[in-house]
């Protein structure tokens, strides 16, 4: 084929994508999939992103909850969607690091190769909470209490293998304590039972309802999982400060889409995502407990690779592969 003909063919393919990217999403509705039930930090963050992007684009951005298999259901829908950038998933430590670590041999998609990572939103710690009636006020006191009564204390989470659950499994291994996991169908249910006293303790993403429950005194926060304290709870220490040196679990949120989306549209998503995250949305997210931290798509992908490697080891040590 003559070089000029080949070049003309390439331009014909590139120009429509470039033109569409200039006006993205071109009046079409977009959607953000959430692989978890309504009410948790992932869902709350997705709805805030959807509202801000919808205002920027002048179109509707829907949030669709597709819970199941710790984010796997929403991931599969995203991979199979049309490659035009209008279907995104609120990717996070659970869906794109822990789920690949647990189900590496069973996934129908490549968690890196089948996705693009255009928008990094930021980081969020988990927080470990107890009912106010519990006779402990620090994480070290809880550890001492648990060691005196192995297997007697319960903790609730949004489900088996999600980030909150795995953060406590890591703590259990590092502190050599035996507390019993009570999985729920969502973060809201786990928090609700901790507030009512049906379970002694609970863990969840700080973003959203847990922060409000802590501030109102309905639960007592013992520690956050991140390496540094949360600006929203400056008086609550970290696990590392509370007798678990070296402990650090920081969750993260971003917008991902499928890898076949043209680069021009991915660049537009990155630019628009970073734009709204530099505006009023930044304070709204940080008020919810999310520390906004943007990145290039390449930096975001590299972070996800590192997280998959980290959690693959934790999952293996906790014997949670593919359960």
Image (cartoon, rainbow, N blue to C red):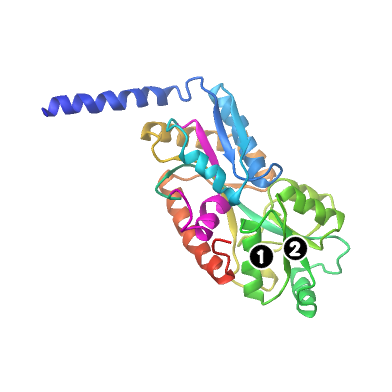
The residue wearing badge 1 is 168
Q: Name, please, the residue furthest toward the bottom.
A: 148
| Residue 199: quarter of image | bottom right
Position of the C terminus by quadrant: bottom right
Marks 1 and 2: in contact by CB < 8 Å? yes
Mark 2 to mark 1 CA distance (whole Å): 9 Å
Residue positioned 75% across, 63% down in the render: 155
- Could you say whether the residue bearing mark 2 is in a helix, strand or loop? strand
The residue wearing badge 2 is 155
* Residue 241: image tag: none
Find out whether residue 98 is within the magenta segment. Answer: yes
Whether residue 275 sits left or right of residue 220 in the image: it is left
Q: Position of residue 256 (x, y in %)?
A: 49, 41
| Residue 230: quarter of image | bottom right
Tell me if residue 183 can be seen.
yes
Residue positioned 52% across, 51% down in the render: 96
Q: Is residue 78 above or below residue 162?
A: above
Q: Is residue 306 above or below residue 316?
A: above
Q: Is residue 45 above or below residue 85?
A: below
Range of residues picked out in magenta: 85-109
Residue positioned 67% across, 67% down in the render: 239
The residue nearer to you, when weighing 242 against 83, is 83
Q: Position of residue 274 (x, y in %)?
A: 51, 37
- Could you say whether the residue bearing mark 1 is in a helix, strand or loop? helix
Q: Residues within 10 Å of mark 2 (few under 14, many from 20)?
A: many
The residue nearer to you, when weighing 225 against 16, is 16
Whether residue 69 sits left or right of residue 198 in the image: it is left
């Amino acid at each position: 084929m003559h070089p000029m003909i080949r070049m003309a063919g390439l331009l014909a393919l590139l120009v429509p994508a470039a033109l569409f990217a200039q006006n993205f999403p071109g009046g079409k509705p977009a959607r953000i999939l959430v692989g978890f039930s309504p009410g948790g930090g992932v869902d709350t963050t997705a709805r805030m992103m959807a509202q801000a992007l919808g205002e920027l684009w002048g179109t509707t951005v829907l949030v669709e909850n597709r819970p199941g298999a710790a984010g796997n259901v929403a991931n599969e829908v995203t991979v199979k969607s049309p490659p035009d950038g209008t279907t995104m998933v609120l990717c996070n430590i659970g869906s794109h690091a822990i789920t690949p670590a647990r189900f590496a041999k069973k996934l129908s998609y490549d968690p890196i190769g089948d996705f693009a990572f255009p928008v990094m939103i930021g980081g969020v710690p988990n927080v470990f909470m107890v009912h106010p009636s519990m006779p402990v006020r620090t994480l070290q006191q809880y550890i001492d209490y648990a060691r005196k009564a192995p297997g007697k204390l319960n903790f609730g989470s949004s489900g088996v293998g999600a980030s909150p659950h795995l953060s406590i499994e890591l703590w259990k291994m590092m502190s050599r304590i035996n507390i019993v996991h009570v999985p729920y169908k969502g973060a809201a249910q786990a928090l609700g039972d901790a507030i009512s006293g049906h379970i002694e303790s609970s863990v969840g993403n700080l973003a959203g309802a847990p922060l409000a429950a802590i501030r109102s005194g309905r639960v007592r926060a013992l520690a956050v999982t991140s390496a540094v304290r949360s600006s929203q709870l400056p008086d609550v220490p970290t696990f590392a400060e509370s007798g678990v040196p070296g402990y650090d679990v920081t969750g993260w949120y971003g917008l991902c889409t499928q890898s076949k989306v043209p680069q021009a549209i991915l660049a537009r998503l990155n630019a628009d995502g970073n734009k709204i995250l530099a505006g009023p949305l930044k304070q709204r997210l940080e008020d919810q407990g999310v520390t906004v931290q943007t990145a290039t798509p390449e930096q975001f992908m590299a972070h996800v690779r590192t997280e998959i490697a980290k959690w693959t080891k934790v999952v293996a040590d906790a014997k949670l592969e593919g359960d």
